[in-house]
Amino acid sequence: MERTRKPAVPGWFTEEGGFRLLGTRCAACAAVFFPREDAYCRNPHCAGGGAMEEVPLSRRGRVWSYTDGRYRPPAPYPSDPGEPWEPYTLLAVELEAEGMVVLGQAVPGVGPADLEVGMEVEVVGGVLAEDADTVWTTWCFRPVGGPA
Ligand SMILES: [Zn+2]
């Protein structure tokens, strides 16, 4: 039976037409927010009054920092203390156009030894968790031209 694919965090990314993270941009000051901010602009220098519009974020960015996580990842990652888990690689990726740093896990098989600060990476879809009916999707980063 085909399992349903569902985003683990609805509204934070899209898989239509290529995987993209989704943020919001203030129409008044053009500040971009991720995670998305739908209620109001958090830029303290903003004049205000602008609508918050959904925008896809850049596909590619550069490694700003990285580490390996040797603790159980927090929600929405599976956090049942009875379940086994694997150390994972966490990346902070700078998106130049948006002027922000986004966190995410590396694709499986990419570890700290495969990464360098300044390396170009791209955002891709990944699997956060699976159960009998559903594949919960998330985002990951992988080196451009690196392992799939
Ligand atoms: Zn604003």
Image (cartoon, rainbow, N blue to C red):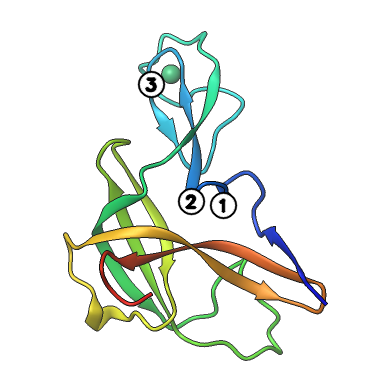
Three-letter amino acid code of the residue under disc 3:
Ala
Query: Tag 3 or tag 2, which sits nearer the N-term?
Result: 2
- Residue underneath mark 3: 30
Q: Does the residue labelled 1 lie within 8 Å of ligand 1?
A: no
Residue 17 position within the rendered picture, expressed as x and y whole percent measured from the top left: 52, 46
Q: In this view, does 70 lie to the left or right of 17?
A: left
Residue 46 position within the rendered picture, expressed as x and y whole percent measured from the top left: 39, 15
Few, some or many C-alpha atoms within 10 Å of disc 2 (few <14, some 14-19, many ≥20)? few
Three-letter amino acid code of the residue under disc 1:
Glu
- Give me the residue at 38% from left, 21% from top: 30
Do the residues under discs 2 and 1 have CB atoms within 8 angstroms?
A: yes
Q: In which quarter of the image is the N terminus?
A: bottom right
Determine the image quadrant of residue 58.
top left
Q: Identify the disc placed on residue 18.
A: 2
- Give me the residue at 28% from left, 37% from top: 99
- Residue underneath mark 1: 15
Above-or-below relation of 8 to 70: above
Q: In this view, does 7 lie to the left or right of 30?
A: right
Q: Nearer the viewer, residue 127 or 50?
A: 127
Indicate the secondary structure of the residue bearing disc 2. loop
Above-or-below relation of 74 to 100: below
Indicate the secondary structure of the residue bearing disc 3. loop
